[in-house]
Image (cartoon, rainbow, N blue to C red):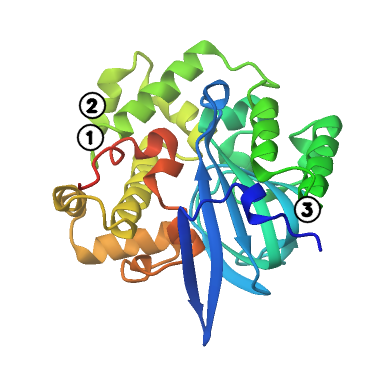
Amino acid sequence: MDRCPPQELGIAPHGRGAAQAGRAQLQFELEIIAPPPEAAAPVNTFYVIETQDARIEEIVPAYSAQLVVMIRGRLIFDRPDDAPVAAGRVAINAPQLGIAPCVLEGPALLVGASLTQAGWQAIANLPADIVHDRLLPADTVLSVADIRKLEAMAADCAAGRRTVRDLCAELAAILSVPRYRLRPEHVAVIEVIMRWLGSGFDPSLEELHAMVDISPRQLQRLSRRYFGVPPAQVLKRFRAIRAAMVLANPALPDGLRDEMLASFFDQAHLIHDIRRYTGRTPTQLRGNSLSTGLLDPNGHGDAASLLRGRREG
């Protein structure tokens, strides 16, 4: 058997759930792992997904770029208006501006890294507004040596010789060494945009413009490169994702839900934006699924700073 013993997987039942698909109740285990300090700048979080089910159909929300290592099973993206694409043993999913239907064929075990906007550019140097919403060949982003190293570690983990935490450590080592040096003024603007997004559910564009010393045209250009869209659209996407996080995490206090609801014009506006950026309705977010589990604020770095530390109890 190629199954890593549970104690070696390092999977505490942080997120143990079931997703309803037809009449079948699908079972999975999900763990979110914080990056070590040296990888905190390029990585929002690491995550581990394991399932013994033969097939799980999911919708990946409009997330940042992802680096995924398949230990077992197969991951297939089935985006609208495009032929299904199967990820390799090492897969690079470019930043997503929209949702992406996918299929996880199991039994499956995978380790993923969610990259920050700066982390994506430091490793790929590919503008988000050009390469978004697509699966990229691993060798367009990683060196051949790094790909081989990750493939070998995945094989070792499948055979029980290494653990998923060993694989996370190797990913952290690779991602903490940038392949491209970002211009300091670009990094400063990214940090300002993230502070602006974290200042409230619906901060004004005027507040952002007052926080930077570049022209609105330059701000739009940098926002497109690192976030894929201008600041107003960045806010719209982040607001919807954070609203989904609030609805998917009942431990968050009622006051925070009130703040979130007040940032939308009405309920129809809330439902429209959440569906657009997560592929789910607010009611569906209250169920257990992989995509809902990945909406834990602890897995979203600065994007969820507004929510972390505000759980009830």
Residue 107 found in image quarter: bottom right
Which residue is more in the foreground, 80 or 69? 69
In this orientation, which residue lies closer to the viewer: 274 or 236? 274
Secondary structure type for disc 3 = helix
Q: Amino acid at mark 3?
A: Ala
Upstream in the sequence, badge 3 or badge 2?
Answer: 3
Q: CA distance from mark 1 to mark 2?
A: 5 Å
Residue located at (64% from left, 40% from top): 165
| Marks 1,2: beta carbons within 8 A | yes
| Between marks 1 and 3 in the image, the one whose residue lies nearer the viewer | 3
**Residue identifier under label 1:** 204
Expressed as whole percent of the image width and height from the top left, the position of residue 3 reads 74, 59
Q: Looking at the rendered structure, which numbered label has been put on residue 158?
A: 3
Instruction: Out of 13 and 150, give the one closest to the viewer.
Output: 13
Q: Secondary structure at mark 1?
A: loop
How far apart, in angstroms, are the residues tagged by discs 1 and 3? 49 Å
Looking at the image, is mark 3 or mark 2 nearer the viewer? 3
The mark total stands at 3
Q: Which residue is mark 2?
A: 207
Element at label 2: helix
